[in-house]
Image (cartoon, coloured by chain):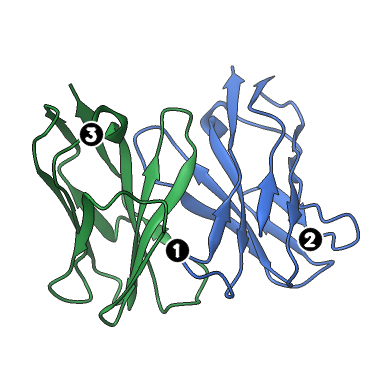
Amino acid sequence: GDSVTQMQGQVTLSEDDFLFINCTYSTTWYPTLFWYVQYPGEGPQLLLKVTTANNKGISRGFEATYDKRTTSFHLQKASVQESDSAVYYCVLGDETQVVGQLTFGSGTRLQVYA
Amino acid sequence: ETAVFQTPNYHVTQVGNEVSFNCKQTLGHDTMYWYKQDSKKLLKIMFSYNNKQLIVNETVPRRFSPQSSDKAHLNLRIKSVEPEDSAVYLCASSSRLGEDTQYFGPGTRLLVL
């Protein structure tokens, strides 16, 4: 079945540091890939979405490239701010799934200190 | 801007009680979902509901049941709660079944004593 792996449970950075969050996926289909972000006390919200291999998604300074060869969809940001502190989920969208169509990774908690 | 609303924000109850959580979406979407988020922030799909078609994740205990009056509402009822039901329950919607972008509510946190 489909799966998403985020190896980093927590990332701690200072403001203006470079952010890199690892994500790899496994599926037999051609999925849509997402990053969702969840701020404290809120539900997850869409950060960016990419539907085509080798394309890049960009939003609010974050970017991720859909790499079909390495089955990766890493999230990057050149310079983080304290307000970016949140949990980031790498998500695989697959219309062939019976329930829900989204497979969430385990999440990476980002803590940014001023 | 919030478009998926959940009530209550927080609920404390005792083992064996029945609880019900409400969810309403104002996006005009056809499909709604319930997820469970545990203390480690892991998200698991419980149900999806579209045009009176309910799809259940087979791992969900039978004491959980979704209830819908129309396509804008999908409530979650838990008969006889257990301690392991303590979690955040998140409601979401999408424009149609198979449309993969989902919009989430703020969640209802359940604590079972």
Kindly indicate whether the residues beneath marks 3 and 2 are on one polypeptide chain: no
Displayed quadrant of residue B14? top left
Q: Which residue is painted at 23% across and 34% down in the image?
A: B110
Tell me the amino acid under the disc marked 3: Leu
**B79 w.r.t. B29: above or below:** above
Q: Which residue is painted at 63% across and 62% down in the image?
A: A49
- In the picture of the structure, the residue carrying the numbered disc 1 is B102
Query: In the rendered view of the protein, which quadrant contains the C terminus of chain A?
Result: top right
Q: How far apart are marks 1 and 3 (CA)?
A: 22 Å
Q: Residues within 10 Å of mark 2 (few under 14, many from 20)?
A: many
Q: In this view, does B109 lie to the left or right of A94?
A: left
Q: Position of residue B8 (x, y in %)?
A: 15, 42
The disc at residue A33 is none
To which chain does the residue with label 2 belong? A
- In the picture of the structure, the residue carrying the numbered disc 2 is A66
Q: Position of residue B52 (x, y in %)?
A: 25, 80
Q: Which residue is painted at 16% across and 76% down in the image?
A: B70
- In the picture of the structure, the residue carrying the numbered disc 3 is B110
Tell me the amino acid under the disc marked 2: Tyr
Tell me the amino acid under the disc marked 1: Gln
**Chain A display color:** blue
**Chain B display color:** green
N-terminal of the pair, mark 1 or mark 3, is 1
